[in-house]
Image (cartoon, rainbow, N blue to C red):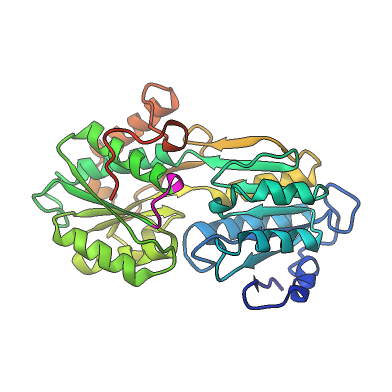
Amino acid sequence: MKRRIALALVPVAALLTLSACAGDGGSSGSTDSAGGGSAALIIAQGGLGDESYNDLAYKGFQQGLADNGMQGSPIESDDVVGQGEQVLRRAGDEGVGVVIDLEYSHAEILPKVAADYPDTDWVLVNAEAKGDNVASVLFQEQEGSYLAGALAAMQTVNTSDPKINADKVIGFIGGAQSAGIDKFAVGYIQGAHDVDPDVKVLTAYSNDFGDPTKGQQLAQSMYEQGADIVYAVAGGTGTGVIQAAKDANRYAIGVDTDQDGLAQGNVLTSMLKHTDVAMETVLKDFADGSFPGGQTLQLGLKEDGVGLTDFQYTKDAIGQATIDKIADLKQQIIDGKIQVWNVVDQGYPDFYSGN
C-alpha cells in the first residue's frame, strides 16, 4: 500500500521503509543495485490533495511504477522549500534508483546533492539543474497560457454570455512571484493583448500554494473590480478561485490538471500541464537504462506537454467560432509563426508590470 512520508514529522529512520513500500512489482530497474528498481517522488509546495500539479504528477508516478515493475513512494515535508537540502539528502540516503523532485525552488541545491549521490539518478521538474546524473523537465507553460489569455480576451467581450459583464477585465492569481509562475502570467497577458490590447489584466499573488481561502478572497476582489475571468496558477489555493467563480457566477481558468468539472460551467477551461506523462516518460527511460542524464526535456504545445481542455462544459457559451480561432493560434505557435515570451530565458517584457 502506498504511503506518504512527511519529513517534518518523522525521524530519519522512518524513511528506511520508503523503498519497501508502495511496490506494484518486484522486478529491478536499470541497475542491479538494491535501489535500482525503486523511486521516490518529492512533492512540491501545496502537497498532495491539491487537485492540481502534485496530484497529477503523483498519478503519473504511480502509473510509471506499475508499467515498469518498480517500487516507490512520495515524500512530503511541511516546509519543502526551507528543508530542501534535508529532504533531498534523506531521499539520497535511502538509496533508491531515481529521485524525481517536483519542487522548482530546489534548482540550486539539487546539483550539489546529486553529486554526493552519483549512484542515484535525479530528475528536477519545472527548473533546470546540471549534473551527469540529473535530468530536467521543463514545460512551455507560457504557450498554453497564451491560449488561455487569448480565450479570456475573446470571451470577456462576449456579453451575450450571462457570466460576462461589460468591462474588458480579466485576472491572474499566482502562488508566488517567481520566474516559474510568471511564465504563466506573461504568456497569459501576451495572449490576451495580442487579441485585444485594451483588455485589462489584474495580477495578484497568494504567496501560498495550499490556501483555498486566500485564493477565494483574491478572486472575489478581482470580480468586484470588474474581472469576469480569473486564471489561477497556485496549486491548491486555486480551488478557492474556482469556488469564488462559482459563487459570483463568473469564470475561473484551472491549471495543470483538468479542473473543468470542479465547478461545471464556471471553469472556462483549464491549462493542462501533463506532468503525469512526464513522470511516466522518465520512469520508463530509467527502467530501460536510457536515463537522460545531463539533458533537459522540453514539453510544449508541439509535444502535447501543455494545452487547453476540450471545453466540455463551456463550449456552447464560448461558441465554435472562438474555439476555431484558438485552434488556429495553437497551430501558429507550433509552426513558429507566434513566438510566446518565456521569462525564464528572456527576462521580463515591458508589457508585464507584476503585482
Residue 182 in the figure: left or right of residue 288: left
Queried whether the magenta region covers residue 133, the answer comes back as no
Place residue 346 in its image quadrant.
Answer: top left
Q: Position of residue 311 (x, y in %)?
A: 34, 49
Q: Is residue 337 above or below residue 111?
A: above
Place residue 99 in its image quadrant.
Answer: bottom right
Q: Nearer the viewer, residue 318 or 2?
A: 2
Extreme residue in the right direction: 32
Residue 62 visible, this orientation? no
Q: Nearer the viewer, residue 37 or 304?
A: 37
Queried whether the magenta region covers residue 176, the answer comes back as yes
Q: Position of residue 125 (x, y in %)?
A: 58, 48
Residue under the point 76% across and 64% down: 24
Identify the magenta region: 175-180
Q: Nearer the viewer, residue 128 or 144?
A: 128
Residue under the point 28% across and 59% down: 265
Residue under the point 66% across and 63% down: 87
Q: Is residue 289 above or below residue 77?
A: above
Residue 86 in the figure: left or right of residue 155: right
Extreme residue in the left direction: 166
Which quadrant, please, contains the N terminus? Answer: bottom right
Residue 161 in the figure: left or right of residue 342: left
Residue 257 visible, this orientation? yes
Q: Position of residue 159 (x, y in %)?
A: 11, 48
Q: Is residue 352 above or below residue 161?
A: above
